[in-house]
Image: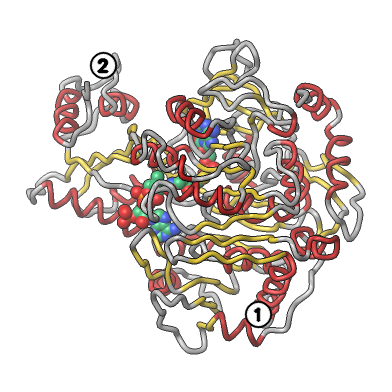
Amino acid sequence: MAIRYEDVYARSLADPEGFWREAAAAIDWSRPFEQVLDQSRAPFFRWYVGGELNTCFNALDRHVLGGRADQVALIYDSPVTGSVQRFTYRELLERVSRVAGMIAALGVNRGDRVLIYMPMVPEAAMAMLACARLGAIHSVVFGGFAPKELATRIDDALPKLVLSASCGIEGAKVLPYKPLLDEAIEIAKHKPAHTIVLQRPQSVAGMIPGRDLDWAAAEAAAVPADCVPVAATDPLYVLYTSGTTGIPKGVVRDNGGHAVALHWSMKNIYGVEPGEVFWAASDVGWVVGHSYIVYGPLIYGSTAILFEGKPVGTPDPGTYWRIIAEHKVAAMFTAPTAFRAIKKEDPKGEFIRKYDLSAFRTLFLAGERADPATIEWAEEMLKVPVIDHWWQTESGWPMVANCAGLGLLPVKHGSPTKPVPGYRIEVVDEQCREVRRGETGAIVVKLPLPPGTLPTLWNNDDGYLSSYLADYPGFYKTADAGFMDEDGYLYVMSRTDDIINVAGHRLSTGAMEEVLASHKDVAECAVIGVADQLKGQVPLGFVVLKAGVNRPPGEISSECVGLVRERIGPVAAFKTALVVPRLPKTRSGKTLRGTMRKIADGEAYATPATIDDPAILPEIAEALGHVGYGKRG
Ligand code: COA
Ligand code: AMP
C-alpha cells in the first residue's frame, strides 16, 4: 500500500475544518451541522454545532436499513461460561430497542444519566446502545472497582437508574456484583430510583422489592423504543478515570465528534473494512471498550467481539488464537500485559501453531508502554505487524499511531510512531517551549483538539481548565512525558503525575495514599509504582506509624492492603505495604518518591543533595529487599 500518511496528516493540520467536514459525511445526521468547529468559547471548542444525530442509529439502524441486517454485528465469546453467541445487526437492533423501551419505561429521558455496572456480557453493550438510543447519558463503571468508588461515581453522575448483573466471572471465580451495588447505593448520598439486574445462573442476586427490577422480565414486557435525535454536542457518555486524587474525573464524550472520529479511525488507523471482524480484548468499563468493543466497530459496520475471559487460564494461553481463528478476526487490539501473560505461559508459541490465523492482519497494542521485548515476541510468533499506539480516556481514540489504513510506516520498537491526523503533538519544557528532538519533556497537544476528544469534564468546566489547559497555554496537557526523535517518532516514557498503569488499568497512587492515610495507626504514607514483569507496574506502599503504636507491623500491613482492596477495589492490585521508620524527604518536606522507586526497581540512584536524612535510604533499601525488591541482579 502506498504511504499516504504524510499528506493526510499535513492536510488535517492545514485545513482541519475541511478535513473533518469531509469525514463527517460518513455519519448519518438527522439535521446537518451549521458549523464544523465553533471556537467562540475557546478554549472550549465544539464540533459540528447545529447538527443532530443519534449514535445508536448510526451503530445499528442504518446498517439494517442499508443491507447489513443479516451480518453478524456482535459476537459474545465467553470461555468462562463455555458459550458463544452471535447477534446479527437486525437481532442486536431488536434487543437494543427493547432494552431502550425498558429503560424509558422507568422515566429515563434525553439527558438523564444511567449508570452501568456490568461484567462482559452482551447486555452491557446493549445497555450502552440503548442509552444512546434515548439520548440518555451512560456512565459505565468497571467491575473491579469497590463499592466506595462506585458510590463516588453515583454521587457525581446522579443517575436515575443503575443497570447491573448478579455477578461477574473472573477466570474460575464467580464474583457477586449485586451486594457491591447495594453497598454502593447505601454509601452514596444520591439514591437512584431503580436498578435493573440481569440475573445470571452462576449466582442469583437478592432483590429489593420496589427498587430492583429483573432484567429479563422488564425487557420482555418493554415496548421497543425509537431513536431520539440529539445535538452533536450533547454528551453520549461520562467515563470516570483516575485523576491525581481520590476523586475521579468524569470525562465527557459528545455524540457528533465521537461518531465521526471513531468511524474515521476504523478505516484509517486500524485499516479494517466494514464487514470485517475487529476485536478489542478489553473491558466495557474502560475507554478501549467504549470506543473499540462497542461504538467504533458498530458505527463502521464491522463485526465486534465481546470477550469474557482472560488471555491465560480460560482455559489456556491459546484462547486469543482460538478466537482469532474461529471468528476470522482481521485486527485485534489489546494491552501489552496480556501478551506478557501469554508469553510467560507459552514462550515458544506452541498454542499459536494449533490455529489457522491466516485471516489475521494486524495486532494493535495500547494502554501502557509496549516494551520492545513483548513487541518482538509478538512479531516473531504472529508474523503480522504489531502496532503500538498511544492514547487516553480523555482523547477517546488514538493520538499517536502507525496508521495501518494510510500505509504502514517503518516500525521503531519503543515508539507508537507518529501523531495521528488531527493531532499536533509537541514535546515542551516547563515554560512551554518546544524542546530539541531527542530531549525529554512534557507531551502536549495543540488546541483545538480534533473531534471525539473530551470537550470538558462532567459538571466541572473549571476542573477541565485546571487539569488539562492551565499549565501549557494553548495546549492540552496529556500528563505523559517523553521525546520525539529526528524522524518525528514519539516515545512515551512516563507520566508526569501520580498515575500508574497496572496491567493496562489506570490508577492513582494519590488515591491509594488517601486510603492508607485513613488507617488509624498510620501517621504518613507514600505509594509508588514499581516495575512488574507481568503487569508493567504495580503499586507499593510505605507507611510510617503514629508514635506509640506498638502493634505488630505485619498486622498493620495486612490491614492496609485490605483497606485499599475494600475502598478502591481488587483492580488496584495493591499487595504490599511496608512499615518504615520514616519516609525519605527533602529538607522542604517533599517525599522522595522517585528515589524510592529507583531503589525498588534496583536502578542506580544518587542520594539527593536536598535530602534531610540520608541514613533513611539504606533502611528503605533493606525493607524493600525483605519483600523481594531492590537489587535484583
Ligand atoms: N470485575 C471484578 N473483579 C475484577 C475485574 C472485574 N471486571 N477485573 C479484574 N478484577 C479483579 C481480578 O479478579 C483480580 O482480583 P484478585 O486480586 O482477587 O486476583 C484483580 O482485579 C486484578 O485483576 P487483573 O489486573 O486483571 O489481574 P489478573 O492477575 O487477574 O490478570 C492479566 C492479569 C494480565 C491476565 C489481566 O490483567 C489481563 O488480561 N489484562 C489484559 C489487559 C486489559 O484488559 N487491559 C484493559 C485496557 S486495554
Ligand atoms: P487510559 O486513560 O486508562 O487509557 O490511560 C492512558 C495512559 O496510559 C496514557 O496517558 C499513558 O500514560 C498510558 N498509555 C496508553 N497507551 C500507551 C502507549 N502506547 N505507550 C505508553 N503509554 C501508554
Instruction: Locate residue 407, reporting x and y percent.
Output: 73, 27
Check disc 1 and give the amino acid type: Met
Q: Amino acid at mark 2?
A: Thr
Of labels 1 and 2, the one closer to you: 1
**Please, what secondary structure does the residue beneath circle 2 have?**
loop
Up the image or down, 616 lies above or below 168; here it is above
Q: Which residue is mark 2?
A: 607
Q: Quadrant of the N terminus?
A: top right
Q: Is the residue marked 2 within 8 Å of ligand 2, measured from its CB?
A: no
Q: What is the tally of numbered marks visible in this picture? A: 2
Q: Which residue is mark 1?
A: 102
Looking at the image, which residue is at 92% across and 49% down? 34
Left or right, 478 with respect to 98, comes to left
Q: Mark 2 or mark 1, which is nearer the start of the sequence?
A: 1
| Residue 233 rendering spot, x and y as whole percentages | 77, 53
The type of colouring in the image is: secondary structure
**Residue 469 pos. (x, y %):** 63, 35
